[in-house]
Every structure is written in C-alpha cells, then in structure tokens.
Image (cartoon, rainbow, N blue to C red):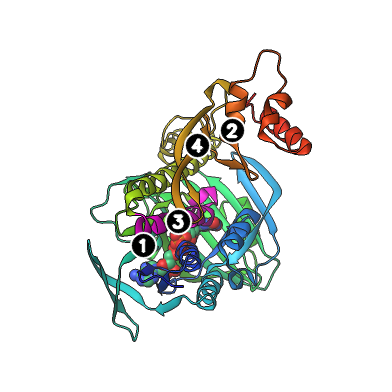
C-alpha cells in the first residue's frame, strides 16, 4: 500500500531513477521531473556499472547495451590496448531509465524543474515546458546532476576543470575508444557504430589559456592532431563544427541531506571523469538513499543517525574516487611541472588509497547500517581500511566472528574458536581463508 507522503525527484538520470525505483518499492507515491539532456554524449562503462544498474531494477535502460569494445590508453608514454569498455549512448540510457520508471508506476513529468521554494513543511516546484505548471512535495530528491543549484551549500571543489566535447562524423565503424595524456590535459575519444566520433579534451580552467569560443574547435583540433591515439578517430571523418563544454571539476556537497531533502548522484558528489566511475558513484549514493529517506519519514527519532549514515558514505565515496584520480594523475610523469598535472596529483590529500589492514586494528563498534529498508544501529567491524564498518559478509554477521577471534585462547585454532558460531564446516573453512587473505588474522 502506498504511503501518504509525496516524494518528488528532480532529474531522471541514473541517480534520480535508481532512487525513485527504490522508494517506489518501499511503497511511496513517486514523481520524477525529467528534462532530457540537452546534448549528445557517449560514455564508457564497465560490467560493474551494468551490474549496479541491474541491481537498481533497470531493464529497459539495459535493453540495448553494446558488447564491450576495445579501449586504447596512452599514458606517460606507454600504450595499453588490453582493456575494454562498453560505449553507451547517454540519451538512450536516460530514455530507458524513464521507461523503467513508468513501468514501475512512477509518475514521470517531462519538463524543466525551474523555481523550487522549500520550507520545513514541504516544497513547491515550478515546472517549465510541461502541461503541468507546478507540483508540491513533502520530500525532495535533488538529482539534477552537476546542474543542480547549490547556492548557500558548503562544497569542496577540486581544481576547476572543463571537458570540451566535439562531434566528428565518419563512416559507420566498429565501436572503440582511446584515452591519451598530453602536456595540458588529457583526451578521450570514442567511435560509435553509426560513425559519430566523440572527441573530448579536458583542461584546467585557470591555466589552460583557452582561446575565445570561435577558436576553441581549432584549438582542440590542433591538440588532437598531435595525439597518436586520436588518428583512427580523425582519419576518414569530418568535424561537424559543434562543440559542447562539460564542467568536470570534482565537487563534494558537505551537506547532502536535510530533514526533508536529499541530494543524490552528481548533485551530492561529482568525480573527475578520468576515473570513468561517474555512473557507478552516482548509483552508489542512490542505492543508499531510499532507506535513508524511509527512516527520515517513518522514524524521525532516528533522523540524525540516518543523516550521519548518508553523509559519511557520500564523503567516503568522494575521497575514494578523488584519490584514485590523484594516483592516476601522478602516474603521468612527463609534464611534472605543468600546473594541470601538478595540482591534480596533489589533491585531495596525501592519504593512501588503501590502508593496510592490521589485525590489531579490528574493532567491534555500533554503527548505522541499512536493514530492511531502514537505517538502524548494529554491531559492525571497523578496520583501518574500512572505517564505515562491515556488518555482513555473504550473509554472515562479522562482529561475532571478530569477538570470537579476540577471545581466542592460547593455542586454540581459528576453526575451533569459530565453532560456537554454528557455521557449516564448509563456511568455517571459507571464513578462515577469507580472514587470512584479508589480513584479519
Ligand atoms: P545526470 O546523469 O547528469 O542526470 C541528471 C538529469 O537531470 C539529466 O537527465 C538532466 O537532463 C536532468 N536535469 C537537469 N536539470 C534539470 C531540470 N532543471 N529539470 C529537470 N531535469 C533536469 N561517467 C561514466 O560512468 N563513464 C564515463 O565515461 C563518463 N564520462 C564523463 C565525461 C564528462 C566530461 C563528464 C562531465 C562526466 C562523465 N561521466 C562519466 C559522469 C556521468 O555522466 C555522471 O556521473 C552521471 O551521469 C551522474 O548521474 P546523475 O543521475 O547523478 O546525473
């Protein structure tokens, strides 16, 4: 049965879509206001993203996925052709998401969410380019990606970055992509089966000394013509003369949740496209959001716990992807003094991506977790590499495992100390192997 709360999601990309589907399953009355993306884009995704989209409940969005295609990477003077990625047309993915939402019974309003007036009691949203001029909501999910307004919010920003996307047209071809670093930035190129080439060049806004708009295409083409991995994309193709600028600065919202609103996906934290993980991270926050919202609405006494749970995860994800990007920038050593590379290899901090797990660092603490569509406190295990805690591993609660290990007698085997947990002999052996592999014992 649907609850009386009216939840409105602004933006129907992967994050807004996944949040709406999750909330619908929890019994909420859902409306998504979605304006189609104003430009064509192709993006590269991995099998992990496909898995994330499937787990979120999308089927139409995944209906026309291409096979993985070859990806050539040329970085720090070395070339690697061993990887693949799936090249997806974002307009197709996004329209599949809206079809999935409608099939699940979510109301989809095509139009532009314009003015949003918010108070403690709810939100009034003005909608442009739609028969429905406005709508009210008890709870608002902000999922308009990087274009979500953020005035007044405390945000952490990396170096200001812009990606200039150009389209060239050639004969239909086998899809492929390539990435290459150069002195002032890096380029990503993709050829789509219909012959469209997507040529994306990423620069530092402050130091790239970019020319006026009229000369931007020539500037990008001069750079691309000097990149060896760009040649297969330029040969036998013609520039269409269309260029589109996408902001790609990493941004973290330090306040991504309030009493009656939440920001998900890029609206909460957007990562550097270099990591190729944008859709994955957008889904990660969106998959947690339904339980967090459910708790805010149904169990207000646990609101602070739910907010803490969500913000910690957003922060953790952001720093993880920022550090992945940092280490990748640091692996380009040829342009060491160029400000593009120097600023990015030193941001956001010097913390290693992973901490070595030390068995002495294992602790059992009370932390918020997702349980049956709500946030509640449970005993979890934290390590120096997993500060947010591990509650279950393949369905086995880990706090009792660590408590058993910590009370292990002198000379007692691991198998014997785990015996009181009642695991089957196979699970006991598997658990001991996992504990050794992960340096927990
Ligand atoms: P979005 O996908 O941006 O969805 C937001 C939606 O809201 C859009 O449909 C938009 O049209 C709509 N919207 C905006 N304003 C309004 C409004 N006022 N009213 C109604 N609707 C509105 N990720 C990858 O995984 N692989 C890549 O190769 C990749 N390449 C990238 C390259 C660049 C240059 C950039 C900038 C990003 C790239 N990303 C990539 C990141 C990826 O695009 C995003 O992380 C991901 O799409 C975020 O999902 P989202 O749902 O949060 O936002």
Gap between marks 4 and 1 measured at Cα: 32 Å
Residue 142 numbered mark, or none: 1
Q: Are marks 2 and 3 in contact (CB under 8 Å)?
A: no
Whether residue 164 is visible to the viewer of this picture, yes or no, is no
Left or right placement of residue 375 versus residue 386 in this view: left
Q: Is residue 341 above or below residue 25?
A: above
Residue 115, position in %: x, y?
25, 71
- Earlier in the chain: of badge 1 and badge 3, it is 1
Label 4 with label 1: CB-CB less than 8 Å: no
Crowding at mark 1 (Cα within 10 Å: few <14, some 14-19, many 20+) = many
Q: Is residue 188 magenta?
A: no
Residue tagged 2: 400
Visible in this render: residue 381?
yes
Residue 142: name its quadrant. Answer: bottom left
* Disc 3: which residue: 291
| Mark found first going from the N terminus, 4 or 3 | 3
């Amino acid at each position: 049965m649907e609850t009386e709360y009216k939840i409105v999601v602004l933006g129907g990309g992967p994050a807004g879509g996944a949040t709406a589907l999750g909330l619908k399953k929890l019994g909420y009355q859902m409306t998504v206001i979605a304006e189609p993306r104003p430009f064509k884009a192709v993006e590269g995704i991995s099998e992990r993203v496909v898995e994330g989209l499937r787990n979120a409940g999308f089927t139409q969005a995944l209906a026309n996925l291409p096979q993985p295609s070859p990806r050539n990477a040329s970085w720090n003077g070395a070339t690697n052709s061993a990887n693949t990625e799936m090249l997806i047309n974002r307009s197709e993915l996004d329209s599949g998401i809206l079809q999935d939402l409608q099939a699940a019974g979510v109301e989809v309003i095509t139009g532009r969410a314009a003015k949003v007036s918010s108070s403690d009691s709810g939100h009034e949203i003005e909608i442009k380019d739609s028969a429905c001029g406005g709508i009210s909501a008890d709870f608002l999910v902000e999922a308009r990606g990087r274009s979500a307004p953020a005035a007044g919010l405390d945000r952490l920003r990396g170096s200001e970055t812009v990606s200039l996307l150009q389209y060239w047209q050639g004969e239909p071809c086998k899809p492929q992509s390539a990435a290459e670093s150069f002195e002032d930035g890096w380029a990503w190129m993709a050829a789509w089966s219909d012959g469209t080439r997507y040529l994306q060049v990423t620069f530092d806004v402050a130091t790239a000394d970019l020319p006026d708009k009229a000369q931007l295409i020539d500037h990008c083409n001069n750079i691309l013509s000097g990149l060896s991995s760009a040649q297969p994309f330029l040969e036998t193709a013609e520039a269409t003369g269309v260029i589109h600028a996408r902001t790609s600065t990493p941004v973290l919202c330090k306040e991504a949740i309030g009493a009656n609103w939440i920001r998900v996906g890029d609206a909460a934290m957007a990562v550097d496209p270099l990591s190729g993980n944008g859709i994955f991270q957008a889904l990660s926050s969106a998959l947690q959001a339904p339980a967090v919202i459910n708790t805010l609405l149904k169990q207000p006494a646990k609101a602070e716990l739910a907010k803490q749970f969500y913000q910690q995860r957003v922060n953790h994800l952001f720093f993880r992807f920022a550090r992945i990007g940092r280490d990748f920038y640091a692996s380009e050593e040829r342009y060491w003094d160029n400000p593009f590379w120097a600023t990015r290899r030193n941001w956001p901090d010097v913390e290693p991506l992973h901490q070595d797990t030390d068995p002495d660092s294992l602790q059992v603490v009370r932390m918020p977790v997702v349980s049956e569509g709500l946030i509640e406190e449970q005993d979890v295990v934290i390590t120096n590499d997993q500060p947010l805690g591990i509650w279950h591993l393949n369905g086995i609660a880990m706090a009792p495992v660590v408590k058993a290990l910590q009370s292990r007698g002198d000379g007692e085997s691991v198998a014997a100390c785990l015996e009181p947990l009642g695991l089957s002999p196979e699970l006991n052996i598997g658990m001991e192997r996992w504990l050794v592999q992960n340096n927990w014992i």
